[in-house]
Image (cartoon, rainbow, N blue to C red):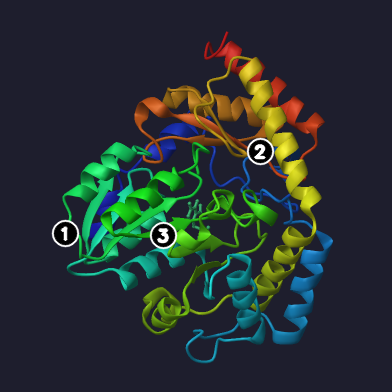
Amino acid sequence: MGQLQERYKNYREPQKYMEAGVYPYFREITSKQGPVVTMGGHKVLMFGSNAYTGLTGDDRVIEAAKKALDKYGSGCAGSRFLNGTLDIHVQLEKELAEFEHKEDALCFSTGFSVNSGVIPAVVGRGDYLICDDRDHASIVDGRRLSFATQLHYKHNDMADLERVLAKLPQEAVKLIVVDGVFSMEGDLCNLPAIVELKHKYNCSIMVDEAHGLGVFGEQGRGVCDHFGLSDEVDLIMGTFSKSMASIGGFIASDKDTINYLRHTSRTYIFSASDTPAATAAAIEALHIIKNEPERLKHLWDVTHYALERFREEGFEIGETESPIIPLYVRDINKTFLVTKFAFDAGVFINPVIPPACAPQDTLVRFALMASHSKEQVEEGVQVLKKIFVEQGIIK
Ligand code: PMP
């Protein structure tokens, strides 16, 4: 037996849940991603997606991707740096920079590689990196790759952030990196307070708009725009894998910082560029996001409806202000049970367990899309209510 096999043969954590019949991961989908998907041969209501704008099955997005496939082929076979730059990559960057009110932008192959490639490129030895302790894993990994001194503050605790900043040298480069919308609990960062501290302590700010793009702000520009603070944020990061119905990510900033990143960010330079189909789909999705405000309105209608209904039924839903609704279970086994019973009753939701949250904070994550109807949301609420009552989680 090889060394690795010897080490991992006893890793049986997932099997424990498989044997108990509650393992919820890697379910195969055999249809388009929409409000209803086919999984394991039966149709389920999808409340576990990040496609907030509901554009993944949109005919125009699909058509744009098909056309790009015909024109440019299936892949770029190289880095943006060398043979991998298409005119549509550059077009998307220009449109995103304009959309985010920044001078320039760069597209990466995934949102994860934006965070893991931008953070270590912009701050290094002698600098300071300050993160919210619930920042996304890609920010954590970007942080780990940086030689900057690593500091963090308690989730959304501005007094704690100030305590951290007050100890740092005024002239040192200090970058605060924060999720705009926290992906599991749906709460927003306190950007106005962070901007105040930026001025008081001479810092820079990077905001991850993965879950804010297409959802908050004018035309869905994101949380920075929602607070009217885009100008105060030095680096705006976004992803195409959620509201933009594709795969890839971007960083938007001033032209000098982008010029530097274009020539130094390792996940940008040493990774192949986004496929033509993915890029064209993202462009089309961006156009729809900009031009169809009624989608955003509907997303917020169903979100407010769901928030109100879950509160009325006595669910504990935390501090969410977004289409991401955490339904707290606060017990790992029950979280798996709830997920399984919901799936059996035709409702797909995501279990959130450690390390994505603290052991006492386990929850199921219920997320809305602009393509959901109120009737579908009500069905989701009813199914979950029955299960939560049966499990003794709510009365
Ligand atoms: N940031 C946040 C806050 C995320 O939730 C995610 C994806 N879950 C990412 C970054 C990574 O984005 P992508 O899926 O495009 O790699």
Q: Position of residue 95 (x, y in %)?
A: 65, 73
Q: Kindly report the distance in space between the C-alpha atoms of the residues bearing marks 1 and 3.
A: 19 Å
Disc 2 crowd rating (10 Å Cα; few below 14, some 14-19, many 20+) is many
Contact between marks 1 and 2 (CB within 8 A): the answer is: no
Q: Kindly report the distance in space between the C-alpha atoms of the residues bearing marks 2 and 3.
A: 29 Å
**Disc 3 on helix, strand or loop?**
strand
Q: How many marks?
A: 3
Residue that sits furthest to the front in the current view = 200
Looking at the image, residue 102 lies above or below residue 183 = below
Quadrant of the drawing holding the N terminus:
bottom left
Q: Residue 47: give its label.
A: 2
Give the residue number, with chain letter if any, for mark 3.
206
**Camera sees residue 377:** yes
Between disc 2 and disc 3, the foreground one is: 3
Q: Which of the two labelled residues, at mark 1 and mark 2, occupies the earlier sequence position?
A: 2
Q: Amino acid at mark 3?
A: Met
Q: Amino acid at mark 2?
A: Phe
Contact between marks 2 and 3 (CB within 8 A): the answer is: no
Quadrant of the drawing holding the C terminus:
top right
Q: Which of the two labelled residues, at mark 2 and mark 3, occupies the earlier sequence position?
A: 2
Residue that sits furthest to the top in the current view = 395
Looking at the image, residue 378 lies above or below residue 24 = above
- Residue positioned 57% across, 86% down in the render: 85
Q: Kindly report the distance in space between the C-alpha atoms of the residues bearing marks 1 and 2.
A: 46 Å
- Residue positioned 56% across, 67% down in the render: 248
Give the residue number, with chain letter if any, for mark 1.
169
